[in-house]
């Protein structure tokens, strides 16, 4: 996958938005104002996704292209190699789904209900 495919897939998620909250090169994707993905436009070889802590460790042990995310809480965030890793495209899509779901499940019930109503 390239950056445009990742961007399009992230934005295809219900209520997904994008913005630059930190600087003009760090693009983040949010659901209900909570970040589920991030990519630095100055280095599009990698992007970051939220992950269940146990699953994050399992992924890092199995794929050299998945490491703890730089500048993010490594317990919950993985950095995924886009161009030079061993992470299959289908897994990248699955990890984006997982990241989105991790954020949604921690939203307040009112916001989760609102998401379900509008799907």
Image (tube, helix red, strand yellow):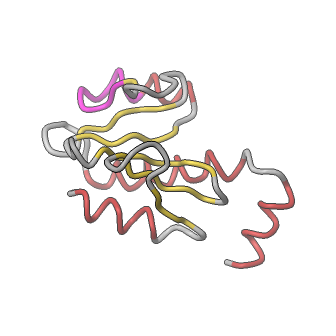
- What residue sits 36% from the left and 69% below the top? 8
Q: Residue furthest left?
A: 84
Indicate left or right for 33 with 1 as reference: right
Question: In this view, which residue lies farthest toward the bottom?
Answer: 118
- Image coordinates for residue 105, horizontal then vertical, percent: 71, 49
Q: Tell me if 105 is positioned left or right of 81 in this view.
A: right
Q: Position of residue 40 (x, y in %)?
A: 30, 44
Is 115 situated above or below 41? below
Q: Residue 45, image x and y in percent?
A: 19, 42
Q: In which image quadrant can residue 90 be found?
A: bottom left
At a point 64% along the width and 56% down the height, the residue shown is 33
Task: Verify whether residue 66 appears in magenta.
Answer: yes
Count how many numbered circles sit on residues in the image: 0
Question: Would residue 82 appear left or right of 74 to someone viewing this image?
Answer: left
Which residue extends farthest right? 110
Residue 42 sits in which quadrant?
top left
Question: Does 30 appear above or below 75?
Answer: below
Q: Quadrant of the N terminus?
A: bottom left
Which residue is rendered at x = 39% and y = 52% of the image? 27
Q: Quadrant of the C terminus?
A: bottom right
What residue range appears in magenta? Answer: 59-67
User: In this rendering, would 25 be left or right of 83?
Assistant: right
Q: Position of residue 95 (x, y in %)?
A: 43, 47
Residue 38 colored in magenta in the image = no
The relative height of residue 82 versus residue 67 in the rendered view (above or below) is below
> Please, is residue 65 above or below residue 31 in the view?
above
């Amino acid at each position: 996958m390239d950056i445009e495919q990742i961007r399009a897939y992230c934005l295809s998620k219900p209520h997904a938005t994008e913005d630059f909250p930190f600087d003009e090169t760090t693009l983040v994707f949010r659901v209900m104002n909570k970040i589920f993905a991030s990519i630095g436009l100055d280095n599009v070889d990698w992007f970051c996704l939220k992950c269940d802590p146990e699953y994050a460790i399992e992924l890092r042990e199995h794929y050299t292209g998945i490491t703890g995310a730089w500048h993010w809480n490594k317990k919950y965030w993985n950095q995924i190699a886009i161009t030079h890793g061993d992470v299959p495209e289908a897994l990248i899509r699955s990890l984006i789904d997982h990241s989105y779901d991790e954020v949604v499940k921690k939203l307040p019930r009112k916001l989760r209900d609102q998401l379900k109503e509008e799907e």
